[in-house]
Image (cartoon, rainbow, N blue to C red):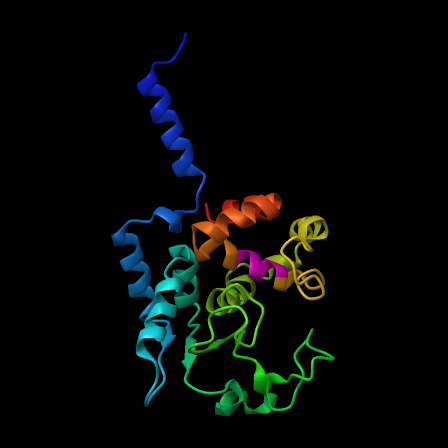
């Protein structure tokens, strides 16, 4: 039986909606719920700082699936926004002069790095974009992805399933001497591509289809 034109349009519309991440077409209620959750996670600096940029960082973090944000909250993780250097903070002072993993030979130390993620997340305000002291597509999404990987997903980037995907696609997002070497960095960067915006989401789907499907299934 040949479907009607209206039915075809409806089917195509459903397909298009289902092929993008929840964050790409989330309604205002969902985004607000995510922001409400983030209000209990994000710690703003005291004193003077760029409030517009800090709020923009929160808005981008609100693109992350709410189940991950709720899990971070339940695990008492805090995302700390910083107005100065990471190593100027008392809790990270021990990193002064230390070379981060994968940064060997760059002449850079943690004093130059604008963010970290894992068991804690710290992000320097105004350094979100690629080239601002890092090569991630987005600083806050990349570093928060490390925390989600480690705390929420029990280091899923180290799982046999993800390592198989990493072996095939780990060099497909560029920066091969870093993303192509460390599975956890490739996971974090892929996560950032998935949730940043529709353009980066589409790029990930095209360049790393297995990684895309992996992240899509995780979010279900």
Q: With respect to residue 98, does 201 lie above or below?
A: above
Q: Position of residue 66 (x, y in %)?
A: 38, 56
What range of the chain is rendered magenta? 186-191
Looking at this view, is 122 or 37 the one in front? Answer: 122
Does the stretch in magenta take in 164?
A: no
The residue shown at (40%, 66%) is: 74
Task: Name which quarter of the figure residue 173 lies in.
Answer: bottom right
- For the stretch drawn in magenta, the main secondary structure is helix
The residue shown at (33%, 88%) is: 46
Looking at this view, is 168 or 198 the one in front? Answer: 198
**Quarter placement of the N terminus:** top left
- Work out which residue is located at the far left of the displayed protein and give it: 29
**Quarter placement of the C terminus:** top left
Task: Name which quarter of the figure residue 80 lies in.
Answer: bottom left
Horizontal relation, residue 121 to residue 36: left or right: right
Q: Position of residue 180 (x, y in %)?
A: 70, 60
Q: Position of residue 159 (x, y in %)?
A: 66, 55
């Amino acid at each position: 039986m040949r479907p009607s034109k209206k039915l075809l349009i409806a089917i195509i519309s459903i397909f298009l909606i289902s092929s993008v991440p929840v964050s790409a077409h989330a309604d205002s209620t969902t985004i607000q719920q995510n922001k409400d959750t983030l209000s209990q996670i994000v710690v703003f600096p005291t004193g003077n700082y760029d409030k517009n940029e800090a709020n923009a960082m929160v808005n981008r973090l609100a693109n992350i699936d709410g189940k991950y944000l709720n899990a971070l909250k339940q695990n008492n993780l805090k995302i700390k926004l910083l107005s100065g250097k990471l190593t100027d903070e008392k809790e990270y002072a021990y990193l002064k002069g230390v070379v981060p993993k994968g940064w060997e030979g760059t002449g850079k130390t943690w004093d130059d790095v604008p963010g970290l993620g894992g068991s804690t997340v710290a992000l320097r305000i105004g350094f979100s974009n690629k080239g601002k002291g890092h090569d991630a597509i987005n600083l806050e999404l990349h570093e928060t992805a490390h925390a989600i990987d480690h705390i929420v997903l029990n280091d899923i980037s180290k799982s046999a399933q993800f390592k198989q995907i990493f072996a095939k696609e780990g060099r497909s997002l560029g920066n091969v001497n870093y993303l192509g070497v460390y599975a956890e960095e490739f996971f974090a960067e892929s996560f950032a591509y998935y949730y940043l915006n529709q353009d980066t989401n589409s790029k990930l789907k095209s360049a790393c289809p297995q990684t895309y499907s992996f992240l899509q299934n995780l979010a279900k």
